[in-house]
Image (cartoon, helix red, strand yellow):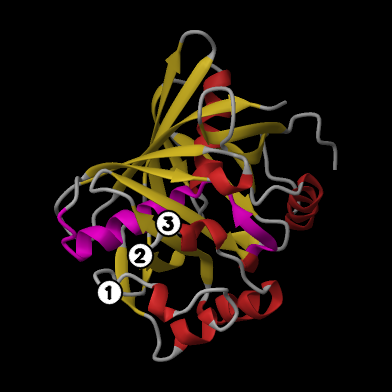
Amino acid sequence: MKMKNLKRIAAFSEGNTGGNPAGVMIGEEFPLDEDMQATAKEVGYSETCFLVPFEDGWRIRYFSPETEVPFCGHATIAAGAALGQRNVSGACRLYLNDRQIDIEIQHHVPDRISVALQSPETWTRQAPKGYTEQVLRHFNFTTDHLDPLYPPMIAYGGSKHLVLVVKDMRVLQNAAYEFEPVRALMKEQGLATISVVYIESLKRVCARNFFASGGVYEDAATGAAAAALAGYLRDLDWGGARSFEISQGVDMGYPSRIFVDYGETKGESVRVAGSTRFIV
């Protein structure tokens, strides 16, 4: 499959550095499914997305190197930047496989594009009994390292994430896991990532998102997980700000900044925003 139309864009970048790269291809019609999957594998990023014109907006599909995924936040932000490069600005509608979302594209001088998305609905629920302990057998920390104020939960913001809040920043920085056993456990519950989080303050959260289910060890910035985390904190009535920043990717050498804003109504959409930078 020809890749001359492929854009490589880092979402949630910090100035001219960092961010999570995604591939973006815009065309008049989708390639064959097997060709989109092969392209995602060849590009090698955690996600590559494909867009075609549809009704009053754009139809979008997302592929990791191993499989199609229902939603990807950072690839959505990257898609917005690619549309912005085509002089699209303001509100824009994206049609996913099973729902629609809205994004907002803003142009800044010089040549800087920021994008905000409104996530799908959010929810949280208890992980199956014993599941967290099973997962942590393959990590280098245990349930004793988790913050008792923030129980392990499965959270949704367009895809499912296991949220684990640790009580020590050093645990987050040194977190590591065994890839194959964790991937199998994630697929068992349909998880997109395992989101390991440290609450630095009531306005700033540090996160790492592990993405074995998609064939990638770790994501540098994860918009869907950011929406899920916001929904999780809202459901817990955590007492923090409804607008806060997530720092991610630092331990990978790709510092990323995700800005989250949510309303007080449980389950409603979360606004997730960030800057972008073009790689190619």
Q: Is residue 9 above or below residue 96?
A: above
The residue that disc 1 covers is 148
The residue that disc 3 covers is 169
Rendering coords of residue 258 (x, y %): 41, 40
Q: Secondary structure at mark 1?
A: loop
Q: Secondary structure at mark 2?
A: loop
Name the residue type under label 3. Answer: Met
Name the residue type under label 2. Answer: Lys
Disc 2 crowd rating (10 Å Cα; few below 14, some 14-19, many 20+) is some
User: Going by the picture, which residue comes out furthest to the bottom?
Assistant: 129
Residue 12 lies left or right of residue 50; in this view the side is left
Whether residue 231 is in magenta: the answer is yes
Instruction: Tell me if residue 70 can be seen.
Output: no
Name the residue type under label 1. Answer: Pro
- Please report contact status of discs 2 and 1: CB closer than 8 Å, yes or no: yes
The residue that disc 2 covers is 167
Q: Residue at x 52, y 56 (%)?
A: 173
Residue 261 lies left or right of residue 16; in this view the side is left
Rendering coords of residue 202 (x, y %): 23, 48
